[in-house]
Image (cartoon, rainbow, N blue to C red):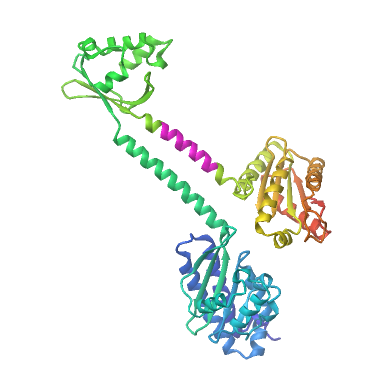
Amino acid sequence: MPRPPFLRASAWPTLLAVAALLAGQVALLWLPLGWPVAVLQAALLAGAVALVAALRSAPPAAAAAAFPHRLLEEALDILPNNSTFALFDAQERMVVVNARTRGFYPQASPSMVPGVQFEEILRSTVALGEMPESGGDEAWIQQRLAAFRQPGAPQIQELPDDRWLRISQQRLSDGSTVILRADITEKVRKERALEQARQEAHNAQSQLSEALEAMPIGVELFDAQDRLVYFNRKMGEMRPWFTLEEGRGLTHEALVRIGLRQGFPHEAMGREEEWLATHLAERGQRAMPEVRSYPIGVWMHAYESRTPSGYIVAVRLDITEMVLQRQALELANQRLAQLSATDGLTGIGNRRHFDAVLATEWLRGARQQEPLALLMIDIDHFKLYNDHYGHLAGDACLRRVAQLLATCVRRAGELVARYGGEEFVLLLPGTDQDHARLVAQHCMDALALERIPHAGSPTADFLTLSIGVAHTVPDAERKPDTLVYAADTALYRAKNAGRQQFDISQF
């Protein structure tokens, strides 16, 4: 019996090429923007060389038997969403593109066949209006051809709607050219927000350091019998109820009792003798500074140290600015934590926040044996909406739908979040199937009342939703993802059944 095509020796160079190409992209996903490009390019180089060698060394029929061209195109679609791959030989003829590339350019797809020149494909795509950024300009075409023929370092391209692409192009050793374009919008936005937060934190820290350096210091000195010898002007400002002349020669205990009669410190009021006994027992023995607030509205670090001769030196450092800065920094950290859990476009919870809440509610439901329901919601034909009205209108549509869905969660613990793209999720703790069904219907009815026009939809003249519903009593032995999978399966059935409806998964 003959070996299957993928077990033949002639197929292994091609298989190795595909593996190397995909390994490069996987590396890119998990590494920061700065240096994963080197890993990607090395993988692409090895893969493309092996691929070209395999295609050249095998007869056409054998190559087709070893790894069909269409199958290779489909296999390359393992690259993440919105990523495209293309390989051209040294004569600028197309060798292979992944199937997603054809999906990006459906009208020009028929021209994307092995052997067709890059320039011919480029001009066809421009002529059919599938590269709107070109404007049909010949100068733009020539600029793109020049970049293709003399590839440089990967470029980060900003689009008008605040979307970002990484375009990587590599000339291989035999003159072939590999092109990879990846949508990195979300990564750029997150890193930009993180960098801004880091910069703000750095600025706050710098201001805090400057405040510490410029901080006035209050100093006082007591002799071996703990009688006041001296204090400076700043220390006097903090305790205005006696002057240096009035206090000199008095013991520390006598001076503290004067303060207690003036209502200082506030924490001693009502238990003065108890507080004073503890304070005197720790006198000159505190390993760490004590934070005190003073009636003049400042915060101080109180340091005390005993000299070899038995004197006690007390130092007061004004940390008012530091306290205020720390409070501001804590507030900034709270805002940053909120930002990391919020979808930047819609203002509702993001995928990361949803995953965290789902894990928590799953364990709680398993512990208390309470039901948990999940609604997976998809805007019907949203791509057609974007194509018809534009991306800015699409973003506005996503925000409007998010606000509407937020009104559908009313009980404590319920969560609405953007799951990704045009998909949203509603997590409903303590909810059985009947209530989940009512919530799903309420979401659809609420959107229907809005009557948001959708001229490009084959389903209705207005924007509609498809919803998948899943519910269960969580089991600690299972993963929370099982609930997501069940809801997603129900959503798939609802969309296949004609959209504008919901389906309930039998979990």
In the image, is residue 332 above or below residue 63?
A: above
Position of residue 31 in the picture relative to residue 266 (left or right): right
Main SS class of the magenta portion in the image: helix
* Percent x, y of residue 195: 46, 51
Report the residue at 40% width, 45% height from top. 202
Q: Nearer the viewer, residue 369 or 232?
A: 232
Give the quadrant of residue 438.
top right
Q: Nearer the viewer, residue 462 or 96?
A: 462
Q: Is residue 12 visible?
A: no
Quick one: which residue is furthest to the bottom in this view? 59
Q: Is residue 329 magenta?
A: yes
* Percent x, y of residue 75: 64, 73
Q: Is residue 288 magenta?
A: no
* Percent x, y of residue 238: 32, 19
Give the quadrant of residue 302.
top left
Position of residue 428 in the picture relative to residue 233 (left or right): right
Q: Pick the quarter of the image with the N terminus.
A: bottom right
Quick one: which residue is furthest to the left in this view? 309
In the image, is residue 117 above or below residue 311?
A: below
Boundaries of the magenta span? 324-337
In the image, is residue 339 above or below residue 135?
A: above
Give the quadrant of residue 382.
bottom right
* Percent x, y of residue 406: 70, 42
Q: Is residue 35 visible?
A: yes
Across the whole image, how many numbered discs are drawn on residues?
0
In the image, is residue 27 above or below residue 87?
A: above
Report the residue at 38% width, 33% height from top. 322
